[in-house]
Amino acid sequence: MKAVDFDYAQPATLDAALALLSRDDVMVRPVAGSQSLGPMLNLRLAQPELLVDITRIPELQAIRREGDRLVIGACVTHARLEDGDYPDVTRGVLPSVAAVIAYRAVRNRGTIGGSLAHADPAADWVNVLTALGAEVVIAGAGGRRTVPMTGFILGVFETDLQPGEIVAEIHVPALSERARWGYCKVCRKTGEFSHATGAVLIDPARGLWRCVAGATSGKPVVIDGPALFEGGCTEAAMAAHLAGSPAADDPIALRTHTVALKRAIAQVMS
Amino acid sequence: MAEVSTAGSGVGARVRRKEDDRLLRGRGRFVGDIALVGMKELAFVRSPVAHATITGIGIPEEHRGAVFTWADLAAGGVKPIRAVSGLPGFKVSEQPALADGKVRFVGEPVAVCVAASRAEAEDIAASVFVDYAELPVNSDMLEAVKPGAPKVHDHWPDNVFLETNVGGTIAEIAATAPVKVSRTIRTARQCMVPLEGKGVVVHWDRHVEQLVLTTSTQMPHIVRAGLSECLDLDQGLIRVVAPDVGGGFGWKGLLQPEEVVAAWIAMRLDRPVRWTEDRREHLVAAANAREHHYEITAYADERGRLLGVEADAWVDAGAYSVYPFSACLEAAQVGSILPGPYDFAHYRCRTFSVCTNKPPIVPYRGVARTGVCFAMEQMIDAVADAVGREPWQVRLENLVPPEKMPFDNVTRKHFDSGDYPESVRRAVAAIGLDGWRARQKAGEPDGRLIGVGFATCCEQSAHGTAVYHGWGIPMVPGHEQAQARITPDGGLELRVGVQSHGQSMETTFAQVAHEVLGIPLEKIKLVHGDTGLTPYSTGTWGSRSMVMAGGAVATACRTLAERLCRIGAHLMQAAGPEAVVLKDGAVTAGGAAVTVREIAHTWYRAPQLLPADVDRGGLEVTAGYKPGSDHGTFSYATHAVAVAVDPEIGQVEILDYVVVEDAGTMVNPMVVDGQIYGGVAQGVGTALYERMPYDAEGQPLASTFMDYLIPGFTEVPHVRIIHMLTPSPYTEFGVKGIGEGGAIAPPAALCNAINDALKPLGVIVTNAPMTPEVILSAIAGQRGTA
């Protein structure tokens, strides 16, 4: 299938992009790597009248260290995060996770901000950045606001983004030297979307114990606190935490999510 | 018969493919690469519902001249596609190229839209409003055969295209057999997913006054015949050309409604038009293969020696009978091929070709054999389990022993040659069964379960005249013809009516010709896939091309060789043709030699030098060929696979995969290996990944590769191939067809391996694909849901 007829703009500055995105006389959508929106356009699931390409805006391409955090521009590609030309403050989380997103061809174009804005529950960044306690900087015509990941992802393909707003930056806090992390996703084939994701971070120096069950039928399920790591890490205990959550739609889904989480935790404990 | 050597570039040589220079550089010419001046693009309005009466079609006024429906085609004299079968009781379906008042599956073409670009044609399609009065749907074949099920074709008494009964009574064996095992077995509906989808460009060629249909097909001559019937146009007014074709697997072995529509539009508008199937159209409207259901019982003695098999089998044939193979080929084939190379005496099988609200079934690589092998090989393992023996031993003891060759099995299939038990022995050795059994015993540190599975399959190829006459479908293969022509500069042109779309015929037919004539491969040109340039052929299907067209090429080249010798002998003033030999591209007599090039020059450009009694047919021959047996050839293989099953998440990793196969004489072993690798990849898809799910309303639940999984290069195992080599006694050089076998055995071998792994848990899986959900459901003690 072919996309409907649409206009296309490629602004050079964020302000110019936001001005276009705030137009209310046409149906407008931002686009970055186009790895999700592209197929949606061709399947005519998305039929915008104006597409605003934000990948030529220099400030959305930057990665910089800012105190105890890494600031990643929304249009940084998965491939660049995989290749690691930046001060990684996450003890390998970013490059390791980036390397298992879909296929390299997708990673070459797909962006971290686009992935978050699309908010597919199975997406790697949706779950991993939640585990890392990252924050999302949202830009709109009215200015900027910062939202924690747990408040940004609201559901399946649902975020806190308001009309005219885009993701501008992702702030990832630096991990301490003793921090440990684990990541497990269950895919039937290489590059396929996950059916169950377990993302785990412990950073005792910062008082952090977090487990995330992702690729559910809702937003990521977050389990905070050391309980799951202190001898109580049984499948029954995990299943109890997940019961009633979007990870427990049916017995097989619950089982698979439990296993993904168990395996992620095992990486931390080993 | 020429002597077969494995050196050089003749039969048996591992020659690199001539076509690769073009194809691997992206310089092939496919339907999508063709641009004709003034060409319009087509987009189809397709039914979004599985079963409905069309109560109205609203076409916006501004697009009235760009949208056509069946009413327009019918007024223009277009007839529905009719693919009948002569088998008694077959019910005929009429498939209008665009829906005629009723739609019968999601994706059925309802109207066609014409515009300068595909995007604009889709815009128009989106503006066409069709009113559907929905009807109850047959989404499952087992429900569709029950009394009171909604009828797909109103004037039929039920939803069964054809019921067949094969074999006799088995009651006595059933009552007395020491061992009886029964299984319910199912394979899922699949798409064939060739790299290139279907596509067709049509224009009326004023110069020759012909309709030229350039189409992505495996059988141009059959498309011409079918088109002629639908359009009521003389075949002489139609030329069908297959350009480069990016894989077919059966999906391009039929007359497509879209081809009929495109042809009619091109004539009506007097404009070139093109339709290109996109991936979504393919996944939705062409989910058309493999869906079988078996209730099967095997009877055996205490050692596991088969005494008899009985089965009821259902094939979901979809809404219409496709041209030319018909809706009944697959199910009827199940009845006749289920026993395969097993030697047992008692058999009964009843089959149903069920009509449902799904796309019409089309024979996919392996056709019914993949399902049949899946069923039969599970039964061998089930019998082995019942008698407490290794499955490979029970398999080996039941297979026809070599001393019984040639062998007519219980359904009178004629197995030409081979040592089937030896293929099992070699597979057991090659996979290293003892090592896996030891590892199984020791257990895996990661908790996964190891399993080893075997499956033996046979592949009947080059099907004969009698059996197709028996089917009574629109196409019966007879003598295959090839034309061989020496060019004035001593090269060779071969013209064949089959069509190469991955089979490497540009190379392998050249090897055959080289074997006979000694002309270098680079001077041999294959012309194929064009009704205007090649002899009639039923086309490329059923692994027939090398046996049939290869045999015809050899035959034609032999006649050419005689004529070359006769002229050569004259030029050398030798005693006669019997005093000379044709070798390495030259006719020689003692120390004297005259090259093919010199002989060609003489015939074409210096005819004054020819003998008075020269054969006036010249250096151009059309020869026909049929193998010595009308039963075709049987290649066969035993597949062995070792897997690790993760019982926590239901995933299967293939740890090793061995194919021991016997293709008879291999014209080019690299090409044979390529066929096996590709076939196994598709078989792995059938086994573990591919399934088009339907809901109760007949809606296909996958429409992109996100939902319809196919194996990629990380999922396809490295396959180790071991060749056996038993020449067929009936064919040129002893070749056998080999195009499908790779895709036949993998689901069975993998199923047996997975069940071997699950044995400690006391559960089995019997349905393909064996997805994590199926395996976890089995482990959880639930019924598999796939």
Image (cartoon, coloured by chain):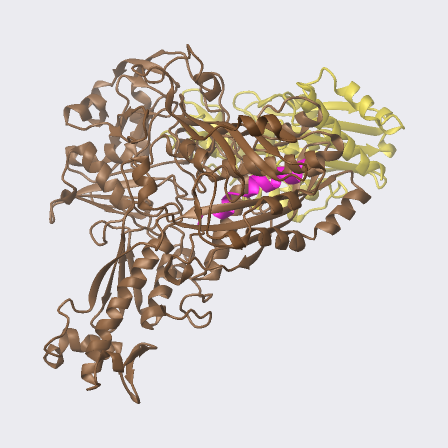
Q: Could one spot residue B559 in this view of the protein?
A: yes
Residues drawn in magenta: B739-755
Secondary structure, magenta segment, majority class: helix
Q: Colour of chain B?
A: brown
Q: Relative to the observer, which residue lies in front, B300 or B241?
A: B300
Measured from the top left, where is residue B396 in percent x and y? 61, 47
Chain letter matching colour yellow: A
Quarter in which the N terminus of chain B is drawn: bottom left
The answer to which image quadrant residue B360 occupies is top left
B156 on left or right of A191: left
| Quarter of the image where the C terminus of chain B is located | top right
Q: B556 or B579: nearer the eye?
A: B579
Q: Residue at 33% of width from left, 78% of height from top?
A: B583
In this rendering, position of residue A98 left or right of residue B442: left
Q: Who is closer to the viewer here, B682 or B554?
A: B554
Residue at the (49%, 53%) spot, across then down: B405
Q: Is residue B639 left or right of residue B286?
A: right
| Residue B603, position as x, y percentages in the image | 16, 74
Task: Residue at 50%, 36% (x, y): give it.
Answer: B372
